[in-house]
Image: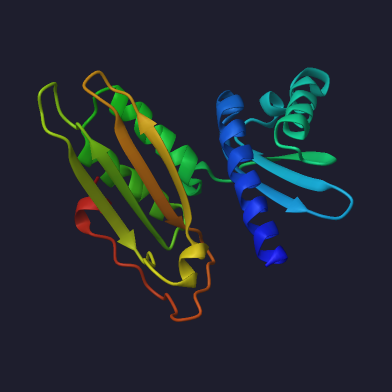
């Protein structure tokens, strides 16, 4: 029971740290964070598009993050490492924010989802799906949901842990829109199946 409680506590700490970093490092292109607890220290690895912005001049930003995480979340001896994102189209949170920015500019939601899925798959993903929910048209329109996917995306069981997922919200003039992005990264091995070929619908290929 003690181990289970500790596991839950660590999961909550990671979620809270992730929310904090997403807000503080939005200009650096925050993508995700890994938190590894050891008896000596807590290793925090932050993935961003722009490491320079996350580190700050003479390490000022990273020092502030370290101090805040230690005091605010009671993390003992946090050690932060900044890693540059290798491929932005395989990072769900970055993809979700790109979609949010386009929705806020008033672009067509269906076309955004189709073209985004094409870019994701062109960068080697084994599967991806995107769900947008809210008022997707002008003022007065009813809220609705649009969901599009391609490739293999498990929906249940332990294998869902192999899928990277992120959520964000767009704020166009006519109301908030929730965005969920799920991506199966290249090279993912599923114990229950082997993925050899991925059929991509023509609508997405031509997006």
Horizontal side of residue 166 vs 109, given as left or right: right
Q: Quadrant of residue 58?
A: top right
Q: Nearer the viewer, residue 25 or 149?
A: 25
Residue at x-position 73% and y-position 33%: 69
Give the answer, above or below, for where 108 lies relative to 12.
Answer: above
Q: Nearer the viewer, residue 173 or 56?
A: 173
Say which residue appears at 27% left-offset and 46% top-offset. 114
The answer to whether 55 is drawn above or below residue 153 in the figure is: above
Q: Position of residue 88 (x, y in %)?
A: 52, 42
Colour approach in the figure: rainbow
* Quarter occupied by residue 2: bottom right
Task: Name the outermost residue toward the front.
Answer: 1
Q: How many marks?
A: 0
Q: Is residue 49 left or right of residue 125?
A: right
Percent position of residue 183, x then y: 44, 55
Q: Is residue 23 left or right of residue 194?
A: right
The x and y percentages for residue 107 are: 24, 28
Residue at image x 69%, y 31%? 51
Q: Residue at x 61, y 27 (%)?
A: 25
Q: Which residue is nearer to you in this view: 79 or 40?
A: 40
Q: Is residue 154 visible?
A: yes
Measured as percent of width and height from the top left, residue 205 is found at 27, 53
Residue 206 visible, this orientation? no
Locate the N terminus and report the quarter of the image it occupies: bottom right
Q: Residue furthest right?
A: 40
């Amino acid at each position: 029971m003690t181990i289970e409680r500790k596991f839950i506590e660590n999961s909550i700490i990671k979620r809270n740290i992730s929310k904090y970093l997403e807000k503080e490092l939005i200009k650096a292109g925050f993508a995700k964070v890994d938190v590894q607890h050891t008896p000596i220290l807590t290793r925090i690895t932050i993935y961003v598009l722009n490491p320079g912005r996350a580190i700050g001049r003479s390490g000022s930003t990273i020092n502030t993050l370290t101090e805040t995480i230690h005091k605010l979340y009671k993390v003992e001896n946090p050690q932060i490492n900044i890693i540059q994102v290798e491929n932005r189209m395989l990072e769900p949170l970055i993809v979700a924010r790109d979609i949010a920015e386009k929705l806020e500019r008033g672009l067509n939601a269906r076309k955004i989802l189709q073209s985004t899925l094409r870019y994701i798959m062109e960068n080697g993903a084994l599967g991806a799906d995107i769900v947008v929910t809210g008022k997707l048209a002008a003022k007065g329109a009813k809220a609705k949901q649009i969901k599009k996917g391609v490739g293999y995306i498990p929906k249940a069981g332990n294998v869902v842990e192999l899928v990277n997922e992120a959520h964000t919200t767009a704020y166009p003039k006519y109301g908030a829109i929730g965005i969920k992005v799920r991506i199966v990264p290249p090279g993912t091995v599923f114990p229950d199946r082997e993925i050899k070929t991925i059929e991509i619908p023509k609508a997405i290929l031509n997006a």
